[in-house]
Image (cartoon, rainbow, N blue to C red):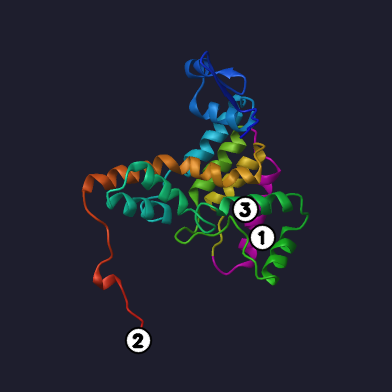
Amino acid sequence: MHVSTRISRITKEAETLRGHALTDLIAGRSFTETAWLALRGEFPSKDQLALFDAALVAAVDHGPAPASSIVARVVASAGNDVHTSLAAGLLAQGTLHGGAIEGAARFLAAHADAPDMDAVVRQEKEAGRRIPGFGHKLLDVDRRSAAIFARAEALGLSGRHCAAASRLEAALKASSSKPLPLNVDGAMAAAFLDLGFAPDHMRGLFAFARLPGLLAQITEERETGELRRLADDEIEYLGP
């Protein structure tokens, strides 16, 4: 088997990431700076790093209720290793949880320069398609999104994708009978696109952001020493 890579080189003499000695990175760079380097092949500017950090912080945890947290805790309760529980939590992230960021990124990238967002919303409604990155099961306003956009604006990094997301949110508000706020998936997608990341990066970036929260959920669950299972009154039999 032959693998060609521009990412890293490991020898007896040194470990190198994108041309930088790992020991130098340990001594002088943060984890998120190094993550950016691994993904992009160069270091971010100070302001780019600040927005990257902010967007990652927004998804670090959202309680035990989301699918990835529930699954991670249930798997941990069955006595599995931490890495197994982490993998289970990551695998529970799908189109409706954790994966919406990719759909939002692709939609924003395709419609960022649309002159009439009201027309875009009408077109999607008539086709029976839901615009990804908007709406939330619990929240009428997603404060995380507002905080990301405020940070992007303060850093001078709010670009065409953040602007498109804001215009879409306004168009949806004007045409819908229920709140459809820009959610954290949509806000992260817009910020990451304006930072130069590709839609293919999005699901991985969300998973990267959520890992500390999942690890916290798992370690807390392991402390209980109890096996999670549904109670009888939580199961409704509908068969013959």
Give the left or right position of residue 76, taking residue 103 as reference.
left
Q: Is residue 23 above or below residue 182?
A: above
Q: Which mark is residue 104?
A: 3
Pick whichever, 95 or 156, lies toward us: 95
Q: What separation in Å lies between label 1 and label 2 (alpha carbons)?
A: 48 Å
Q: Is residue 153 left or right of residue 73?
A: right
Residue at 31%, 47% in the rendered image = 80
- Residue 117 tag number: none
Could you tell me residue 228's position as x and y percent?
27, 57
Q: Residue furthest bottom?
A: 240
Which residue carries the number 2 mark? 240
Secondary-structure class at tag 1: helix
Foreground residue among 36 and 7: 7
In magenta stretch: residue 210: no
Crowding near pointer 1: few (<14 within 10 Å), some, many (20+)? some
Total marks drawn?
Answer: 3
Q: Tag on residue 171?
A: 1
Could you tell me how far apart the alpha carbons at marks 2 and 3 are, in whole angstroms? 42 Å
- Label located before the other in sequence (1 or 2): 1
- Residue 45: which quarter of the image? top right
Q: Quadrant of the N terminus?
A: top right
**Amino acid type, residue under disc 1 in the picture:** Ala
* Quarter-of-image position of residue 180: bottom right
Q: Secondary structure at mark 3?
A: helix
Mark 3 or mark 2, which is nearer the start of the sequence?
3
Measured in 3D between alpha carbons, the distance from the residue under mark 1 to the one under mark 3, in whole angstroms, is 16 Å
* Circle 3 crowding by C-alpha within 10 Å: few under 14, some 14–19, many from 20: many
Mark 2 residue type? Pro
